[in-house]
Image: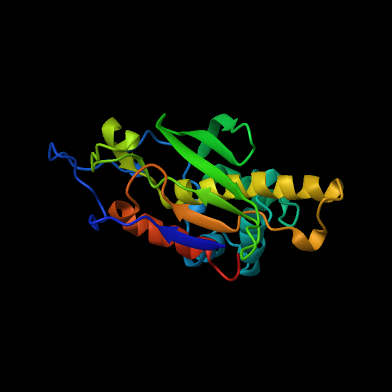
Amino acid sequence: MTTSSSASDAASDTPVAESGAKAATAADAPTALPSILDLSRENLVSEIMDMGEKRFRADQLWRSLYNDGTESFDEMSTLSKPFRKSLSEKFSINPIDEALSLTSADGSTSKSLFRLHDGELIETVLMRYESDGHRRNRKTACISTQAGCALGCTFCATGQQGFRRNLSVGEIVAQVIAMQRTASAEDEAEIAAGKRTKGELQGVTNVVFMGMGEPLANSGAVLKAIRTLNASWG
């Protein structure tokens, strides 16, 4: 999939609101099991080996998370039951929970409202484009990178809400996985109806960071999320 970011003059990793208050982060939120989606490939391998498992288990786990979009450790049948239990005691998977989903009358756009574990809300959009003669049909996921925004742009509804906190790597990646799950289900339904072949299964084809927040003001997490999304092994 293709990833891109909206442009801005703000390039610091941690934005500061006009009041001068230090930016909040996901780490400041109430305690919850950390999402395994926050881990880079290297950190995942290290965690798995520290748990006494072989390195190849990280490959199996990675494929379950990112290729299959598995939502529960219990569903990962390639892993042993004791290992799945250990994982569930140490990590959560999905750090976002869909509170609401709306689709436009023409079916071209769907917007999802996600609740984070600390109660903050973010929006994610799936946009569907038909082939226009020189480009094939595509499905673009528009991803949020912050809860709120500190820039305060007068033309932007998010900017008027004020800044709440940066999103974690896992919270960013989880939005793409959620949109991929929706897009793939649509593809499968069209295949079942004879409207496309299995070779035309595409899911999300593009990702843009143009949802809530300024991506360059949370560049550390955004860049790590991009590496995960573009990983050749995922």
User: How is colour applied across the structure in the image?
Assistant: rainbow
**In percent of the image, x 79 and y 63: which residue is there?**
199
Residue 49 in the image: x percent, y percent? 55, 65
Q: Position of residue 83 (x, y in %)?
A: 65, 52
Location of residue 107 with respect to 61 vertically, above or below: above
**What's the residue at 54%, 35% (across, down)?**
112
130 relative to 227 in the view: left or right: right
x 71%, y 51%: residue: 76
Task: Judge whether residue 20 can be spotted in this image.
Answer: yes
Residues 95 and 84: in front is 95
Position of residue 99 measured from the top left corner of the image (x, y, whole percent): 54, 28
Q: Is residue 50 left or right of 19 when viewed as pictured? A: right
Q: How many numbered marks have been drawn onto this rendered protein structure?
A: 0
Q: Residue at x 19, y 45 (%)?
A: 16
Picture quadrant of residue 92: top right
Quarter of the picture containing the C terminus is: bottom right
Which of the 4 quarters of the picture holds residue 101?
A: top right
Front position in the image: 106 or 164: 106
On the rendered structure, is 5 left or right of 191?
left
View extreme (front): residue:
133
Q: Is residue 87 visible?
A: no
Rendered location of residue 166, percent (x, y):
33, 45
Quadrant showing the N terminus:
bottom right
